[in-house]
Image (cartoon, rainbow, N blue to C red):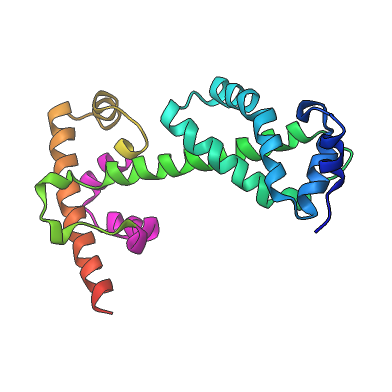
Amino acid sequence: MGNSILDEELKQGMLKDELDDDLVINDILNGNKQQFKILMQRYDKKLYIHLKRRFFFSPEDMDDIMQDAFIRSYKSLRTFKKGRSFYPWLVKIAENVCKDYLKKKSNRKRLEELYPPRDNISERNELNDEILGLETITEAIKKLPQNQREVLILRAEGYSYAEISEKLDVPQGTVMSRLNRARISLQEKLAYLKMQVGEK
């Protein structure tokens, strides 16, 4: 395989920072995949600062997000329209990665809120969230007594115990008691459903 145009430019002494994004992208699409590192090095710090300021992720989360953002942008590189600025396109992809990440965290938080504490159940009864899914959980919630169902849903929506107490006009202790009973009942229903799924 012959040298690419980009390789020739580098041989002539042009610095990587001086190379046009379109030239780099064209070289990548022509098979010189390692040149994607030029784009990563060029925009890594700038993109990191932008996402950190907007989404306030932890450093650990940011590491995963940055990696996913560059992987997704690399896989989508053929959709990039030449002549446009690369960085705004990269930012849009990275922000979508962040939104997807937030959505997953939100779903996980909701699942954890709906499930009772796992340290009170045996290992063989732990639920497989991927098998059951939110749709099955919703169906199980519908089968709970109304007074348990309403506190469980309100708590999952982010209401505090005090706010639920005021909203339902019941003592806070009653709210906590109903929530605990709802979680135990829900766990039993979902454990049964998981057992049925496993038998199929």
Residue 185 percent coordinates (x, y): 16, 53
Q: Quadrant of the N terminus?
A: bottom right
Q: Which span is picked out in magenta? A: 130-153
In the picture, measured across the screen, residue 140 lies left or right of residue 135, that is: left
Which residue corresponds to the image point at 42% horizontal and 40% vertical from the top-left? 106
| Residue 159 inside the magenta-drawn segment | no
- Position of 75 compared to 107: left or right? right
Q: Position of residue 119 (x, y in %)?
A: 12, 45
Q: Quadrant of residue 60?
A: top left
The residue most toward the bottom is: 200
> Quick one: 74 or 97, which is closer to the camera?
74
Give the quadrant of residue 136. bottom left
Tell me residue 56's x, y (percent). 49, 23
Frontmost residue, 188 versus 154: 188
**Front-lying residue, 142 or 136:** 136
Q: Nearer the viewer, residue 135 or 127?
A: 127
Q: Residue at x 44, y 26 (%)?
A: 59
Figure quadrant of the C terminus:
bottom left
Q: Main secondary structure of the magenta part?
A: helix
Is 182 located above or below residue 87 in the figure? below
Residue 171 seen by the camera: no
Q: Is residue 141 above or below residue 94?
A: below
Left or right, residue 67 beside residue 188: right
Residue 141 on the magenta span: yes
Q: Quadrant of residue 165?
A: top left
Name the residue: 72% across, 43% down.
35
Q: Is residue 36 visible?
A: yes
Please tell me how many numbered marks the rendered image carries: 0
- Name the residue at 33% across, 39% down: 156
